[in-house]
Amino acid sequence: MNNQDIKILLVDDEPDILEIVGYNLSQEGYKVSTASNGVEGVKKAKKEKPHLIILDVMMPEMDGIEACEQIRKAPDLKNTIITFLTARGEDYSQVAGFDAGADDYITKPIKPKLLLSKVKALLRRLKAEDGNATIVKVGKLTINKEEYKIILEGKEILLPKKEFELLSLLASKPGKVFKRENILERIWGNEVVVGGRTIDVHIRKIRDKIGDKSIKTIKGVGYKFIE
């Protein structure tokens, strides 16, 4: 997929951010649209179906957390990549963002080159998804990578994109220990700077949904999936 085919929606109530970030993304060839608040962002997301949404947290009318939740409820947007771009760097804000269904979290201020690097890393998975229509079955768990579905004991479980990819990775080789650095590179990309806490938050959410016994921590080194 070429940059010219990729649609990015930028949602922020700061005109300078819309102008500067939008300009840099456009220079890379991306199709960029903007919205100045959460309500407008949700409407544009449903209409335009972007591949990536860059979403501010603190906005009028509807904040980014609620907007992310509304976007994730739309069936056509379940595979859309969502990253928050905000000045708030507190742990609770990041956890709230991941709980709402975000895939990543970028803290302002950020240099244009670094932002573009992060965007490219997030979009790399679009190419990886092309032609990847496999179904993985591990015990009572079925993972449909094409439809982004998780079936456990006959019941469908909804997972945000990043949680789905993390579970798919661990379940692809049951019993294998995936080290933290390997997980970060495979799921977030080596150009995206995230910490071990990010993995822990996602693992906790997955455990809450599929059961504590399915994923084990290996002495703080990494994780493995157990049938």
Image (tube, rainbow, N blue to C red):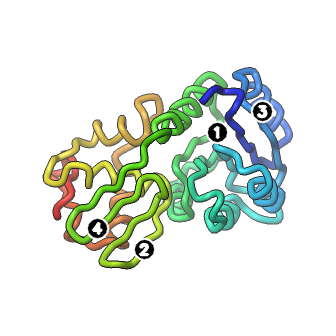
The residue under the point 63% across, 68% down is 73
Mark 4 and mark 2 in contact (Cβ < 8 Å)?
A: no
For marks 2 and 4, the one nearer the N-term is: 4
Label 3 residue SS: helix
**Residue at label 2?**
156
What secondary structure is found at the residue carrying circle 2? strand
Q: Which class describes the residues within 10 Å of circle 3: few (<14), some (14-19), or many (20+)?
A: some
Disc on res. 22: 3
Residue matched to label 4: 141
Foreground: disc 4 or disc 3: 4
Q: Residue at x 54, y 60 (%)?
A: 101
- The residue shown at (27%, 42%) is 180
Q: Give percent across and percent down for residue 105.
A: 55, 46
Q: Identify the mark nearer the N-term, 1 or 3.
A: 3
Would you say the residues marked 1 and 3 are in contact, meaning their CB atoms lie under 8 Å apart?
no
Q: Are marks 1 and 4 in contact (CB under 8 Å)?
A: no
Return the mark for residue 108: 1
Q: Nearer the viewer, mark 1 or mark 3?
A: 3
Q: Residues under labels 1 and 3: Cα distance?
A: 15 Å
Res 93 seen here: no
> Compared with residue 175, is residue 16 higher up or lower down, i.e. above or below?
above
